[in-house]
Image (tube, rainbow, N blue to C red):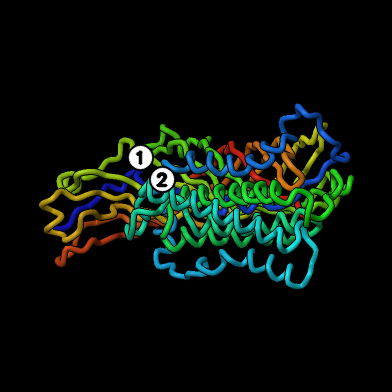
Amino acid sequence: MKAKIPKNNIYLRYKISFTLLTCFFGLTATSANAQYADTVLKPAPVNSFWQNNLVQKTTVPAIMFGATAISWPYRAEIREVRNRYIPDFRYHYDDYLQYAPAATTLALKAFNVKGRSSPKRAFVSYAFSIGIMGAIVNGIKHTARIERPDASTRNSFPSGHTAMAFMNAAVLDKEYGQEGYPLLGVGGYAMATATGLGRGLNNRHWVGDMLAGAGIGILSTELGYLVADKIFKRQGIKAPLKNNSIPINSNPSFIEVHLGYALATSRDLGPDSKSFYAKKGFNFGFEGAYFLNKHFGLGGEFAFTSFPVHPNRLELDDYLTEISEDIFTQALGVRYLNAGPFFSYPLPNNWFITAKINTGISSGSKGNVIIQLKDEYTEEYDRPEVPVLVYKPKVALSWTTGVGVQKRVGPNVAIKAYGTYFNSAHKFNFNVLQGFNGDGNPVYNELPTGKSRTRFDHITFGLGLTAFIW
């Protein structure tokens, strides 16, 4: 028995999306290193909000916890990216990499490389940090009882591996990254980010688990060092660097991670589309640039945008309507790698205006439009669902432009509110369900590639964490 699907505009205006990878979660690689200021950072008035010690110590963890709440409703969609592209990922480097920043700190202490604290004071700080982190993580795990993505246990939230990795990275950054070795801080947070990503790629954690773990790890380090400072006072600690260890004319080379909401501006993704339209989505990405002076640099960005979609006036032939119970589609979106100039303009009180104009390539994610079969047909075809349309966009040129307002909240970190416009247009390959063969397996027909293109144009608004290096 063979069913034909009318070759109407089901596919001509269909668009695709790549969901945000967990990554992210690596979202916190940016708490690592330093920004610059156009003028020397002077002692701030007592009532300065951003110079308040409590604010500086809790800003990054608060952003991580906020990102956890924002991303929580999308955790299944984010995991779908992993399941669609690398479902068989099984590389458990994260079991070991979480300890790498701590091993680095230990090695530097063993070779008598002077950092913030004496070995004794550093050990006590670390002991309190790991004790606080362990108590928080395990207390929440056994209270929240969130099931892991692989359904193995109910102790997913938060990620203990990620908390351990970011606690170790924060210790390395405090001992050496903020004491004249900024690249060590960047390296520590990069290893912690890779650990968090590994937990998601190995299907052991949701993205919110990793973001919360990162925040707990950093906050635990701050609390552990606070306790040690109360115990040791000024004993066994290096004389603090001057108010601003960053040269006045530093070039603001940086790495950054950002997360935001995406709004489609293309009519191809809008409610007027003849088959599907995009809802509000999200964007996640990394970017970095090397600055030739304090205003101009060259760099690039790698990012994903994902749009949940809603079927709208999709027409199926009578046979498919008879056997189907519901229809749904995987998320639409795009991933892109762009490069170009970056700009920075300092303002008073450690505020900055940033901008970029990048161009490169983009690729949409392969996906399916799927019908869920009614119970009687589930048994007949030995499957609960079947794709009626399989699509894959071709690689296309893309460009982005954006502006940001950035605030330095401490000697080693900045927060940025940004807006970015993305533009690309893609041709597609389509395979449409033609029916079922004698064994009950679906049969597809490849449609000829037309001249029409689907535009993925959208605007993203969000927040980023910036680490500056030089």
Q: Secondary structure at mark 2?
A: loop
In this rendered view, identify the residue nearer to me: 338 or 154. 154
Q: Determine the residue located farthest toward the top in the rendered image.
A: 47
Residue under pointer 2: 14
Where's residue 416, x and y in %?
A: 67, 39
Asked if residue 202 shows in the view, the reply is yes
Residue nearest the observer in this picture, 128 or 206: 128
Using a 10 Å C-alpha cutoff, classify the residue at mark 1 as few (fewer than 14 neighbours), some (14 to 19) or many (20 or more). many
Q: Is residue 451 visible?
A: no
Badge 2 density bin: few <14, some 14–19, many ≥20, Cα 10 Å = many
| First reached walking from the N terminus: tag 1 or tag 2 | 2
Camera-side residue of 207 and 289:
207
Residue receiving disc 1: 275
Instruction: Classify mark 1: helix, strand or loop.
Output: loop
User: Is mark 1 in CB contact (under 8 Å) with mark 2?
Assistant: yes
Q: Give percent across and percent down for residue 15.
A: 44, 46
